[in-house]
Amino acid sequence: MKPWALLSYLLRYPDRAIAAAGPELRAEVAGLPPGAVREALARFLASWGDDVTTLQARYVETFDLRRRAALELTYYAHGDTRERGMALLRLKKLYRAGGLPMESSELPDHLTVMLAFAALAQAGHGEALLAEHRPAIELLRLSLHDLESPYAHVLDAIAAGLPPLSVTERGEVARLAREGPPDEAVGLEPYGPPEAMPTGAPSKVRRMSCALPPFRSCRITQAPEGAVSVRRRSPM
């Protein structure tokens, strides 16, 4: 079983609870099967200190101040365009159809949300979604390596859990890197026309109920309503 929940957790904004979880994170990584994923995450945690301000500043500098390192994966292909709005709508409908309607401060294309879905969805569904966005994941991985960011090792671990890039996907990575995202600026909410928005919810859906650290205690429960909840940050 691939550690999608752990990978989602490592890419979240490091609030005080996450920053203090260093020992638990190292123990979790040490318990992974030998291989590329464990090695990559061990490299990442080698840079993990216990100063929350430093960790937060590194995260913001890496992901919030650099468009080339966006965690919102549909941005690479669509920029802030109407096509991206429809891609976001499709993701929200996909999560709901999988019994995991989204409740998050992030957009549905945020990599932490996709990884959380992969951790909870039926076998193969999450991997298929991540594979669909493989070129964007690879472009983000390469960008983080260019920036010499420790987070590049987390992307290495994600890539190690996915099929190798095809020739077509490599060409798409090169095109995205060369051309960059479209720059047509439009509003993204509510991702599409009202008649296209999903309404209602299944009578029984699965809810992610996670105590800290969530990668050990994630469990699926039945509830009248539920959501994939990936909270990013608390006020500083």
Image: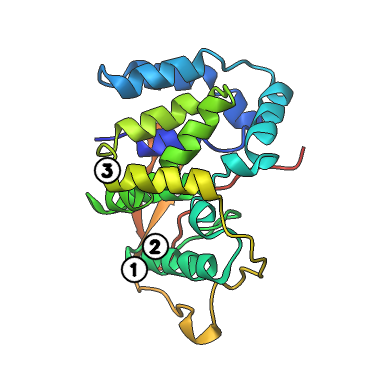
- Circle 2 crowding by C-alpha within 10 Å: few under 14, some 14–19, many from 20: many
- Left or right of residue 59, residue 99 in this image: left
**Residue 171 screen position, x and y as percent:** 36, 45
Callout 2: helix, strand or loop?
helix
Is residue 115 something that shows in the picture?
no
Q: Name the amino acid type tagged 1.
A: Ala
Q: Quadrant of residue 184?
A: bottom right
> Which color scheme is applied?
rainbow
Residue at 58% x, 66% y: name it: 81
**Cα–Cα span, label 1 and label 3:** 31 Å
The residue identified by callout 2 is 95
The residue identified by callout 3 is 167
- Where 36 sits versus 13, above or below? above
**Residue 57 screen position, x and y as percent:** 72, 29
The earlier-in-sequence mark between 1 and 3 is: 1
- Circle 3 crowding by C-alpha within 10 Å: few under 14, some 14–19, many from 20: few
> Most extreme residue toward the top, as rendered?
46
Residue at 39% x, 41% y: name it: 218
Residue at 73% x, 25% y: name it: 53
**Residue 88 screen position, x and y as percent:** 49, 64
Q: Name the amino acid type tagged 2.
A: Tyr
State the count of labels.
3
Closer mark to the observer between disc 2 and disc 3: 3
- Where 11 sits versus 97, above or below? above
> Most extreme residue toward the bottom, as rendered?
195
**Cα–Cα span, label 1 and label 2:** 5 Å
- Left or right of residue 114, residue 13 in this image: right
**Residue 129 screen position, x and y as percent:** 33, 53
Callout 1: helix, strand or loop?
helix
